[in-house]
């Protein structure tokens, strides 16, 4: 795929090396730049089967801790770089669309695999779990490993950091790095931390690349440009490829064939002059593609050693300006009395509070000995910081790729004004001090990457998630959380403040401009979907909150107590969670605030997504004692993985990611350390709890009979549902039509009901993988089990579908059901078609079966109870004995409304009652009974 074919072509030319062994020969340590985008799966901990479940973050942080200790022990210093550059149109979206299309195909394959087999997907379909970037940034920050996030061009900024800070080498997997030729180049996709205390990978002899391709050094950039990239696409070079004899589609061409053909063409050019090369390639110097070719060649030249020096001389040596004497550029700036050098929440008091809350949350954690021990972690951080990080890196702790100067911020503000926006967008640009602070924190990995794209480009690119593109059960996740982002847009651009000032000026008659339209900002959201595969963005307007929100300057830099309260209120308002119990730590612990707000936002939606047992499964996962026990979770096995469970995990993690964006927009009222995802979520543990919740009879069984956990779950559920009229999602509809079902995927039974002449004579459940350990329930003729509560226990007032009523405890519900007398059911069902059924050797007629069914049928709560009393029980038993004799002789006695057969079956045990119970229940009675099997 373009320049990446060059990386593929040289894979076999790499030489296996051990980075720790190389570090022994470097005095003062071995300093490397690591491009994290090429080894996300490695930083996650390798290919583990749980990545599709939503992310196993405790295992991820355990691996990062082990890696940090090994690096400190062998004196290897890493600066990890993440891609935070927004794909600015019209160049980068093509590459972004291709990436998202690949991920979409993999997600479809993963979900299809889970539905058909119920097992974890293979590693070839790896897709980064939602929230992986945030988890890695938080974990690396906690371990004091330097981070850099790009903002404009990722590869250029990474190689620029490597040259500017004099790093010994670069670890990546992009073909552009081969052309840039850093000091040493290692493969990030082959990076592997072994048990032998070695960090193995491959090294490419990039300085031998011209000899390997037989291309002069000064023509290497032209070769890279002709392979296709973000500036000059492969589609634009189709005619050129046909002239080289490549007629088939680009995807069907082996990388060796393409590279050898282009290398031969570049080698045979008469000169290195670009004008003559453009004429030779396109036939005309005025061709639009000729300008793009020159631009692409210059792009690669800027990344080389010689080109980097010239490039930095032209744009990097700017005169230092005194920021203290500068006047605010924006007339809307109202932060003259505020310290805008850093966020107000970056104070030592706020950081210490977050650290104390984190220690409290992990006090009983058993992630591993190294991670749970604060002293060992601090030792690792000190060892990494004490290495010889030249150029002042030790003091900065996190290097930035380019110095953030005032002129850059002015250029960014100018660019944001020039960004294409519809005529309805009349909101002024963000304040200069906000842009400067956002750029600084973005480069150091201290702020959500979407913040800078929103403030400078008014655009945001949202990745493909682990969801069904048909949205059968769960709506589009990005569209579901759009209201939160709309509030964020309004906060960042001070929409409420501008509207208030415009209205005030209009009332006073001092307005110098027309205020016919209220201030509105619109942000372009790039969402890849089947309907719109990234071709055009969706213009989303900002929406103000329903209370006077302070300006973004006051939210970010205000130090008063009222400012602290408004920061938290703004965040909770964005998440629809501004309720008293949400800030009560006895109900919602500080480290679970992010999860609680996400779940409340899901519950406040007009769309019923969660069922009661699923909400409790999320809460039981957050309070589980095994949440941070990485070794236990790694050995734990889940009998079956459901597609719905996987999508629910992606839904909550996407909500947590959106909550982090809202938290940063409101001035970070929630400390960064207590917002770590490993404190409240684990995908593998969640799948286990979701499977168990379908069969547990009560909440205590779901919580492994830990009563303290039960109390915590109930209190947090109360805080989440405070003031809401809850409507739970409906359970899956049963199969009701005739003889249906049959064999499902790969021979699994889907479940069915058997009817003879309109009478149900048998019913069996589906054989799902997660229920393999439980016996399947068999419903006999005329027997309908009582309505079950959310956990499968029998209860008279259990879960009732959309009404939202909550079931009682299992024991009390069972006792109430046993003590309640039988009630007569009045219904107008059509009579069953004639059929015969042999019971105890006697042929039963349909009318006999129907009369008995009406006497002893299960009933609804609206029916009137029978007037049977306890004194009639002995007479029934005696009559039953006589009836048994008559059944054996084939006789029929008396004209009692209850037939002999009915009396016989009434006196027999539970099995006979199952056979003669009511069989005319409507379909609605089957809804909400739960999927738990009936114990015999």
Image (spheres, helix red, strand yellow):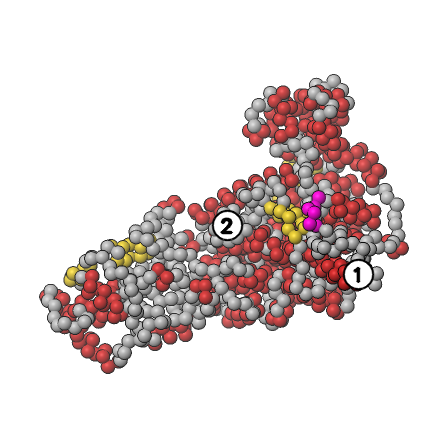
Among all residues in the image, which is located at the extreme bottom?
871
Give coordinates of residue 728: x percent, y percent.
48, 63
Q: Is residue 281 above or below residue 515?
A: above
Q: How many marks?
A: 2
Viewer-side residue, 639 vs 859: 859
Expressed as whole percent of the image width and height from the top left, the position of residue 494 reads: 73, 58
Secondary structure beneath label 2 = loop
Query: Horizontal and vertical percent for residue 933?
Result: 37, 61
Look at the image and give the residue range highlighted in magenta. Answer: 420-425
SS majority, magenta: loop
What residue do we see at 41% from left, 71% from top? 797
Q: What whole-number distance in Å separates the C-alpha atoms at marks 2 and 1?
A: 52 Å
Residue nearer the viewer, 682 or 512: 512
At label 1, counting other C-alpha atoms closer than 10 Å, the crowd grade (few under 14, some 14-19, many 20 or more) is few
The residue labelled by disc 2 is 471
- The residue to which callout 1 is attached is 509
Q: Residue at x 61, y 33 (%)?
A: 1
Which percent across, then down, holds residue 930?
Answer: 40, 62
Q: Nearer the viewer, residue 586 or 63?
A: 586
**Residue 520 image-quadrant placement:** bottom right
- Residue at 77 percent across and 68 percent down: it is 560
């Amino acid at each position: 795929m373009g320049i990446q074919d060059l990386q593929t072509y040289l894979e076999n030319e790499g030489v296996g090396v051990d980075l720790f062994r190389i570090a022994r020969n470097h005095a003062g340590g071995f300093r490397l730049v690591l491009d994290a985008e090429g080894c996300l799966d490695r930083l996650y901990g390798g290919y583990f089967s749980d990545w599709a479940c939503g992310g196993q973050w405790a295992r991820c942080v355990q691996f990062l801790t082990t890696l940090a200790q090994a690096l400190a022990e062998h004196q290897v210093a890493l600066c990890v770089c993440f891609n935070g550059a927004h794909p600015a149109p019209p160049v980068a979206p093509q590459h972004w669309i291709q990436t998202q299309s690949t991920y979409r195909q993999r997600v479809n394959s993963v979900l299809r695999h889970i539905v058909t087999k119920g097992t974890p997907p293979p590693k070839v379909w790896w897709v980064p779990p939602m929230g992986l970037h945030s988890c890695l940034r938080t974990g690396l920050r906690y371990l004091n490993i330097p981070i850099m996030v790009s903002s404009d061009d990722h590869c250029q900024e990474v190689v620029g950091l490597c040259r500017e800070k004099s790093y010994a080498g670069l670890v990546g997997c992009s073909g552009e790095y081969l052309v840039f030729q850093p000091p040493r180049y290692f493969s990030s996709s082959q990076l592997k931390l072994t048990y032998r205390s070695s960090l193995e990978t491959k090294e490419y002899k990039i300085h031998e690349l011209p000899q390997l391709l037989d291309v002069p050094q000064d023509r290497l950039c032209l070769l890279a440009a002709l392979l296709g990239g973000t500036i000059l696409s492969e589609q634009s070079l189709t005619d050129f490829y046909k002239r080289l004899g490549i007629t088939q589609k680009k995807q069907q061409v082996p990388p060796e064939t393409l590279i050898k053909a282009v290398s031969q063409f570049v080698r045979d050019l008469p000169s290195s002059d670009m004008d003559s090369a453009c004429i030779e390639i396109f036939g005309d110097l005025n061709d639009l593609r000729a300008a793009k070719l020159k631009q692409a060649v210059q792009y690669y030249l800027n990344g080389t050693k010689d080109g980097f020096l010239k490039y930095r001389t032209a744009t990097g040596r700017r005169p230092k300006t005194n920021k203290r004497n500068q006047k605010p550029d924006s007339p809307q700036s109202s932060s003259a009395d505020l310290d805008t050098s850093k966020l107000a929440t970056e104070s030592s008091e706020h950081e210490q509070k977050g650290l104390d809350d984190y220690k409290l949350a992990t006090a009983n954690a058993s992630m591993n000995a190294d991670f749970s021990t604060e002293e060992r972690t601090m030792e690792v951080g000190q060892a990494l910081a004490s290495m010889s990080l030249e150029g002042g890196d030790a003091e900065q702790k996190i290097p930035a790729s380019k110095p953030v100067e005032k002129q850059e911020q002015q250029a960014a503000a100018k660019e944001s004004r020039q960004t294409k926006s519809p005529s309805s967008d009349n909101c002024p640009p963000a304040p200069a001090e906000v842009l400067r602070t956002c750029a600084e924190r973005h480069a150091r990995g201290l702020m959500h990457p979407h913040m800078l794209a929103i403030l400078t480009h008014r655009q945001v690119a949202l990745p493909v998630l682990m969801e069904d593109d048909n949205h059968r059960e769960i709506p589009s996740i990005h569209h579901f959380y759009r209201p939160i982002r709309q509030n964020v847009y309004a906060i960042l651009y001070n929409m409420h403040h501008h509207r208030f000032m415009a209205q005030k000026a209009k009332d006073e008659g001092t307005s110098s401009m027309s205020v016919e339209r209220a201030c509105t900002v619109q942000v372009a959201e790039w969402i890849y979907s089947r309907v719109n595969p990234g071709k055009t963005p969706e213009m989303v307007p900002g929406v103000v909150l329903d209370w006077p929100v302070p300006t973004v300057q006051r939210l970010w830099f205000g130090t008063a107590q009222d400012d602290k309260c408004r920061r938290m209120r703004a965040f909770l308002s964005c998440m629809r969670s501004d309720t008293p119990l949400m800030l009560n730590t006895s109900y919602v612990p500080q480290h679970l605030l992010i999860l609680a707000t996400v779940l409340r936002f899901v519950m406040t939606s007009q769309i019923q997504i969660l069922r009661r047992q699923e909400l409790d499964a999320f809460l039981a996962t957050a309070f589980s004692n095994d949440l941070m026990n990485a070794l236990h979770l790694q050995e734990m096995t889940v009998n079956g993985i459901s597609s719905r469970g996987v999508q629910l995990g992606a839904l909550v993690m996407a909500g947590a990611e959106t909550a982090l964006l809202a938290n940063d927009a409101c001035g970070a009222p929630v400390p960064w350390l207590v917002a770590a995802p490993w404190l409240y979520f684990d995908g593998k543990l969640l799948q286990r709890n979701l499977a168990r919740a379908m069969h547990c009879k009560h909440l205590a069984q779901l919580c492994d009979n830990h009563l303290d956990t039960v109390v915590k779950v109930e209190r947090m559920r109360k805080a989440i549902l405070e003031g809401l009229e809850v409507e739970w999602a409906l359970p899956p509809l049963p199969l009701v039509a005739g003889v249906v079902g049959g064999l499902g995927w790969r021979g699994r039974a889907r479940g069915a009901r058997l009817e003879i002449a309109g009478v149900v004579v048998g019913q069996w459940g589906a054989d799902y993988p997660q229920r393999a350990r439980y016996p399947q329930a068999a419903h006999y003729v005329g027997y309908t089990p009582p309505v079950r509560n959310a956990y499968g226990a029998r209860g008279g007032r259990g879960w009732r579908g959309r009404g939202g009523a909550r079931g009682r405890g299992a024991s009390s519900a069972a006792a109430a059901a046993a003590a309640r007398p039988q009630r007569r059911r009045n219904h107008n069902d059509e009579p069953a078609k004639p059929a015969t059924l042999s019971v105890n050797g006697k042929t039963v007629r349909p009318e006999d079966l129907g009369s008995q069914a009406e006497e002893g049928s299960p009933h609804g709560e609206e029916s009137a109870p029978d007037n049977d009393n306890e004194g009639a029980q002995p007479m029934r038993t005696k009559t039953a004995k006589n009836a048994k004799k008559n059944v054996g002789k084939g006789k029929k006695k008396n004209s009692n409304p209850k037939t002999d057969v009915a009396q016989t079956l009434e006196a027999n045990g539970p099995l006979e009652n199952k056979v003669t119970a009511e069989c005319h229940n409507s379909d609605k009675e089957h809804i909400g009974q739960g999927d738990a099997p009936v114990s015999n």
